[in-house]
């Protein structure tokens, strides 16, 4: 049986088992089953920094020190990420406008949770440059690791041919070792997925989810439309990849992202599959995908569009067209500012609510189901990374020809 099918079966079984067990069995599940999922995630996370470092260095060195090509890839990648993020917010508005989540909801007694303050733009720039690259690697801070790997790769291209070839072969072999380890770990993915999702379903049973089902439904439909309408179009028309082949190649990473709610955890699998199943070049995937893991938040942007309208409906506030434009603008820029910050979804939503002066108490309505919504938005985030990677890869091949 195909690994993607096995993971899908594990997802279905975990949902069914979770609904049967319910909150009453949560202590047992947390003690004996959840740790298995944690072990699986730890194995995946163990490979994030090695695979990003080795692959990115190999990608940069394969450019042969061509700074123009690196700049061109960077510009195209960032522009595409910002465009798809803006589209995601608009799509979130459209779906929420039809479903109208939050209408008639009882909001008495809701208190806004504390949300970390988003870093300023200049602070993001400062944090990009690591004072200690080893410390950044140990803490799993992907953006500083990317900067360090880029500099190492550029430095290798400045060496004489004998030394540069030795280091290029060394990092290339290191990347291949990482992919072999990831392949071994993924054989246990169905068990890991089941163990990760079961506690979530047990905790968030029907009684908790039903009152906010309209929000979950709106986010789920919006995420599905973003994947089908936007990403499949990008992959096929601009990336030259058949939509069926695209989603088949992305399926393992999508399911892993859905289960773990972590773009970083899905990154090693995404990089491996984009190269092996979609046929994308290593020099493109090694740069576009890690960058997307840190700044591309299409799913979170879509969730923000839905939730802002949900909060407005719940509190009886009418959003004007200028308010919606402000949300799109703020959300698009905030997607970079909050990249890689824990709880980024709630931080972005807090910034948007504040920008259009919606009640901050609305955060309390969303916080209870944030873990469920996070599953959908993380899945969309990494799918968007793959779609943009397809486009950049094809344009670079055309440029080379």
Image (cartoon, helix red, strand yellow):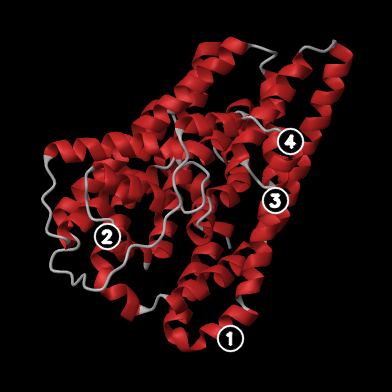
Q: How many numbered badges does the structure rendering display?
A: 4
What's the residue at 15%, 36% (across, down)? 322
Report which residue position mark 4 lands on. 132
Alpha-carbon distance for marks 4 and 3? 27 Å
Residue 299 versus residue 159 in the image, above or below? below
Q: Secondary structure at mark 4?
A: loop
Residue 37 versus residue 228 in the image, above or below? below
Rendering coords of residue 159 (x, y %) = 82, 13
Q: Quadrant of residue 136?
A: top right
Q: Nearer the viewer, mark 4 or mark 1?
A: 4
Q: Nearer the viewer, mark 2 or mark 3?
A: 2
Report which residue position mark 2 lands on. 362
Along the polypeptide, which appears first: circle 4 or circle 1?
1
Along the polypeptide, which appears first: circle 2 or circle 3?
3
Rendering coords of residue 355 (x, y %) = 26, 42
Alpha-carbon distance for marks 3 and 1? 30 Å
Along the polypeptide, which appears first: circle 4 or circle 3?
4
Rendering coords of residue 22 (x, y %) = 44, 85
Q: Secondary structure at mark 2?
A: helix
- Tell me the number on the disc at residue 182: 3
Along the polypeptide, which appears first: circle 2 or circle 1?
1
What's the residue at 37%, 46% (across, down)? 348
Alpha-carbon distance for marks 2 and 3? 40 Å
Instruction: Rate crowding at label 2 as few (under 14), some (14 to 19) or many (20 or more) other CA atoms within 10 Å.
Output: many
Closer to the camera, 247 or 61?
61
Q: Is residue 312 left or right of residue 8?
A: left
Q: Nearer the viewer, mark 3 or mark 1?
A: 1
Report which residue position mark 1 lands on. 28
Instruction: Rate crowding at label 1 as few (under 14), some (14 to 19) or many (20 or more) other CA atoms within 10 Å.
Output: few
């Amino acid at each position: 049986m195909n690994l993607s099918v096995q993971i899908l079966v594990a997802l279905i079984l975990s949902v069914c088992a979770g609904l049967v067990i319910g909150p009453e069995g949560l202590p047992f599940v947390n003690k004996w089953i959840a740790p298995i999922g944690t072990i699986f995630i730890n194995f995946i996370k163990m490979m994030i920094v090695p695979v990003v470092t080795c692959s990115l260095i190999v990608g940069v060195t394969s450019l042969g020190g061509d700074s123009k090509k690196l700049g061109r890839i960077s510009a195209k990648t960032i522009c595409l990420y910002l465009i798809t993020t803006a589209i995601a917010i608009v799509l979130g508005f459209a779906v929420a406008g039809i479903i109208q989540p939050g209408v008639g909801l009882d909001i008495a007694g809701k208190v806004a949770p504390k949300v970390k303050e988003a870093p300023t733009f200049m602070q993001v720039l400062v944090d990009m440059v690591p004072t200690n690259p080893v410390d950044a690697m140990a803490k799993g801070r992907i953006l500083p690791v990317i900067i360090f790997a880029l500099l190492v790769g550029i430095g290798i291209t400045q060496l004489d041919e004998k030394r540069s070839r030795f280091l290029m072969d060394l990092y290339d072999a290191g990347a291949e070792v990482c992919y072999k380890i990831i392949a071994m770990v993924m054989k246990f993915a169905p068990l890991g997925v089941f163990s990760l999702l079961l506690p979530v379903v047990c905790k968030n049973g029907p009684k908790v989810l039903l009152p906010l089902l309209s929000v979950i439904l709106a986010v789920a439909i919006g995420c599905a439309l973003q994947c089908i309408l936007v990403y499949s179009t990008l992959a096929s028309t601009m990336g030259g990849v058949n939509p069926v082949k695209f989603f088949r190649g992305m399926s393992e990473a999508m399911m892993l992202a859905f289960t773990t709610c972590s773009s970083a955890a899905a990154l090693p699998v995404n990089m491996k599959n984009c190269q092996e199943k979609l046929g994308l070049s290593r020099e493109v995937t090694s740069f576009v995908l890690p960058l997307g893991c840190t700044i591309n938040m299409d799913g979170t942007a879509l969730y923000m569009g839905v939730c802002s309208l949900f909060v407005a409906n719940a509190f009886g506030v009418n959003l004007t067209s200028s308010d919606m434009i402000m949300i799109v603008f703020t959300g698009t820029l905030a997607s970079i500012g909050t990249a890689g910050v824990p709880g980024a979804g709630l931080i972005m939503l807090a910034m948007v609510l504040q920008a259009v002066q919606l009640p901050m108490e609305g955060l309390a309505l969303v916080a209870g189901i944030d873990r469920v919504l996070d599953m959908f938005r993380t899945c969309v985030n990494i799918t968007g990374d793959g779609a943009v990677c397809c486009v950049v890869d094809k344009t670079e091949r055309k440029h080379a020809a």
